[in-house]
Image: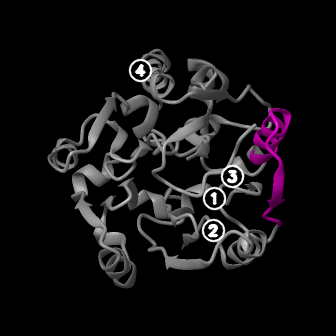
Amino acid sequence: MKYGCQSMVEEIQAILIKRPQEAFISQEHLDENWKNFKYFGCPDYATVLKEYEVFEQIIRKHVKEVYTLPADERTGLDSIYAHDPLKITKKGAIYFPMGKELRSKEYLATKAYLESIGIPTLGEIQAPGKMEGGDVLWIDEKTVAIGRGYRTNDEGIRQFKELTKDVVEEYIIIPMPHGDGVDACLHLMSIISFVDRDKAVVYSKYMPVFFREYLIDKGITLIEADDEEYDYLGTNLLALKPGQVVFIKGCPKVQKQLEDLGVEVLTYEGKELSYRGTGGPTCLTAPLYRI
């Protein structure tokens, strides 16, 4: 199987998802667990299924190979957000024991599945290192930005650098703000999503000045989300290919800016599926191969 995903925007050829049937399980399971996972209210399971059907149809229409994670007792509700336990490099997958305790064994389930379909393991981040996929942002094939915050620590970054030293030339470490606190899901990719090689949706309020200036100096057009649309995941977009993105409905100001710049925006209703658990279309997917 072909693999390797050192880009946020090149065309996705293979992708990994996990359906709500295997993650949320049932309304009863959601009722029992949503508070422990600190969701913004309990998702309505029937609505989740409808929202996910639309989302999955978009993915299957535009991506050649779609792989689905099975149910696994080592995982919980958040495993529907398949992006965070790993990153796929050209040398194989790197797995993360995530900072959120309830997700600490999730990577084991993902690793077992991906090895079963032929994706080799490059390594794992070992404790006391912590890292999550949402903190690892490819600027280009040889350059990676890493958010250093509550979910990703210095030791995790050190190990990631060691594992990727043969395929990465530049690391940009981004100090993350306290934001809404220790328990909030704040990743680097919460405040920036590339939608094309030279365009990104951003929430500048949480972005260090040096990083914002770095992006501008590279010629990247910054599409700004305001407070309201940031709160509704307006900076969490999945690029299927340069200039074509999947986006949650409900952020019209960001959507208009994108469309005015010629970006094709494919939308899905996501209040129950995405907003409740703070996981937009990027979080719902783990691209395995981009070219």
Q: Are marks 4 and 3 in contact (CB under 8 Å)?
A: no
Q: Earlier in the sequence, mark 4 or mark 3?
A: 4
Image height of 101 relative to 44, above or below: below
Query: Which numbered disc, 1 or 4, marks the residue that appears first in the sequence?
Result: 4
Mark 1, residues whose alpha carbon is within 10 Å: few (<14), some, or many (≥20)? many
- From the viewer's perspective, is the residue at label 2 or at label 3 nearer? 3
Give coordinates of residue 11: x percent, y percent. 49, 43
Q: Is residue 26 shown left or right of residue 247?
A: right
Magenta span covers which residues?
107-126
Which part of the image, by quadrant, shows the N terminus? top right
**Residue shown at 64% from the left, 38% from the top:** 79
Determine the image quadrant of residue 72. top right
Residue 182, given in percent of the width and then of the height, sits at 54, 65
Q: Earlier in the sequence, mark 3 or mark 1?
A: 3
Amino acid type of the residue that numbered disc 2 sits on in the rendered structure: Thr
How many angstroms separate mark 3 from mark 1 (CA)?
7 Å
Per the image, label 4 sits on a secondary structure element best described as helix
Q: Which mark is residue 132?
A: 1
Give the foreground label among 3 and 1: 3
For disc 2, the marked residue is 152
Q: Which mark is residue 54?
A: 4
Which of the two labelled residues, at mark 2 and mark 3, occupies the earlier sequence position? Answer: 3
Q: Position of residue 102 (x, y in %)?
A: 70, 47
Q: Is the Cβ of the residue at disc 1 closer than 8 Å to that at disc 4?
A: no
On the question of residue 237 being in view, the answer is: yes
Distance between the Cα atoms at labels 4 and 2?
A: 32 Å
Q: Report which quarter residue 67 is drawn in.
A: top right
